[in-house]
Image (cartoon, grey):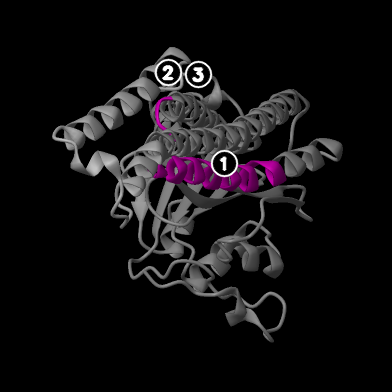
Amino acid sequence: MSHAPQSTKSGLPPGTLVHVGEARPDQPRITLTAYGPDNHRAAEVDRWSDVEASWGDEPVRWINVDGVHVPELVRQAGTRFGLHALHLEDVMNTRHRPAFAPLDNGGFVIILKMVGMNKKLKRLVVEQLTVAAHGDAVLSFQEQRGDVFDGLRERLATGGGNTRGRGAEYLAYRLVDTVVDQSFFVTDHLMDSAEALEERILKNADAESLLELQRLKKMLAQLRRATAPLREAVAQLLKDPPAVVEAETRKHWHDVHDHLIQIHDHIDSLRDTLSGLMDLHANGVNQRTNQVMQLMTMVATIFIPLTFIAGVYGMNFDHIPELHWKYGYAMVWAAMVAVAGGMFMLFRRKGWI
C-alpha cells in the first residue's frame, strides 16, 4: 500500500489540506449517533449534508468519520465544529504527534493514537484518532474502519453506564479513556512476551530469540511515541480546561492522566527489562562460545601428545629400534589410546567435560 510522504506538503501554504498517510481507495464512512437519557439513534450516511439534514434535537450527538483522505469532507466537518484550517491540516496528517488545542468557541480538539495488537502478525497497529468537542456534539476522525469503541457504542445503545446522562464533553473523555485503557492491554501483552522470552533465552540464546527481542523493543518504542505526547496533551487540558469541560469531568481527566503516568512507568520498566534481556542474550552467546572453545581446546590438548608420538615414529631415520619390533605398531597404538584415555578421565574428574 502506497504512502503519501510528508515532503508532499513542502512549499504549500499553511492550512493546505493534503493527506499524509496510507493511500486508501475506499470512500469515508460517516456515522451519526444521537442520544439522550431516554433515547438513542444511530445511522450511517454518505455525505456531510446528510449529517446536517438528520442532526435532530437530541442532547448529544457523535459524528464519527472513518477516513481522512478526502479534503472536502474534512473541511466541511471541521468548519461545522469551529476547527481552524491548521487543525484540519493536522487531522489529515496521520503521522502527527499527539496534541491538544483549545478552540475559540470554548471547545477543544485532541489528537491521539489508537494502539492495538495484531497477535497473528506479532506487531502493533497504530492509528490516528482526532476528537473535537463543541457544544452538544463530538466529532471524531479515524484513518479507517474498525476501532475499540464497540463496547461504548453498545452501552450508548442499551443505556448502560452514565454516558447517556452526561454531555458531549463527557463523551469526548470516554473516547480518550477507552484508547488509553487499550494501551494497558498492549503493555500487559508486552510484559507477558518479555517474561516468556526471558525463559527462552535462559534455555537457548539463539538467533530467533534475538529477533524476537528486537521486535519487542521496536513495539515498545512505538507505544512510547504514542502515549508520552498524549500525557503532555492531557496535562495541558487540565492546566487550562476549556469552557466546555465541566468540573466533574475534570476529575475523570485527572484519572486519564494518572493512567498515562502508569503506562509510562510500565514502559520504563519494560525498557529496563528488555535491556537486561539484551545483556542476558549476549552473555548466553558468550557462554556458548566459551563452551565451544573449551571443548575445542580440550580436543586439541588430547591430540597434542598423540601428534607428538605420531611425529616421532614418522621421522625418516634408519635406526629407530621400535620400527623393527614385532608388536611395535600395536604398542604405539596402545600408548596413544592410554594417553588419550588418561587425559579424558582427568578432564572428567576436574569437571571440564
Q: Quadrant of residue 158?
A: top left
Q: Which residue is mark 2?
A: 346
Q: Where does the magenta region start and end?
A: 203-230
Mostly what secondary structure, the magenta segment? helix
Q: Quadrant of residue 292?
A: top left
Give the vertical position of 261 relative to 103 (above or below): above
Residue 61 relative to residue 144: left or right: right
Residue extending furthest toward the bottom:
11
Q: Nearer the viewer, residue 220 or 309?
A: 309
Instruction: Identify the element where label 1 is drawn.
Output: helix
What kind of element bears circle 3? loop
Amino acid identity at mark 2: Leu
Rendered image: mark on residue 161: 3
Which amino acid, by three-letter code, is at mark 1?
A: Leu
- Labelled disc at residue 38: none
Considering only vertical position in the picture, is 84 above or below 325? below
Q: Of label 1 and label 3, which has the lower sequence position? A: 3
Q: Can the viewer see residue 59?
A: no
What crowding class fits label 3: few (fewer than 14 Cα within 10 Å), some (14-19), or many (20 or more)? Answer: few
Q: Residue at x 56, y 34 (%)?
A: 283
Q: Residue beneath label 1, please?
A: 220
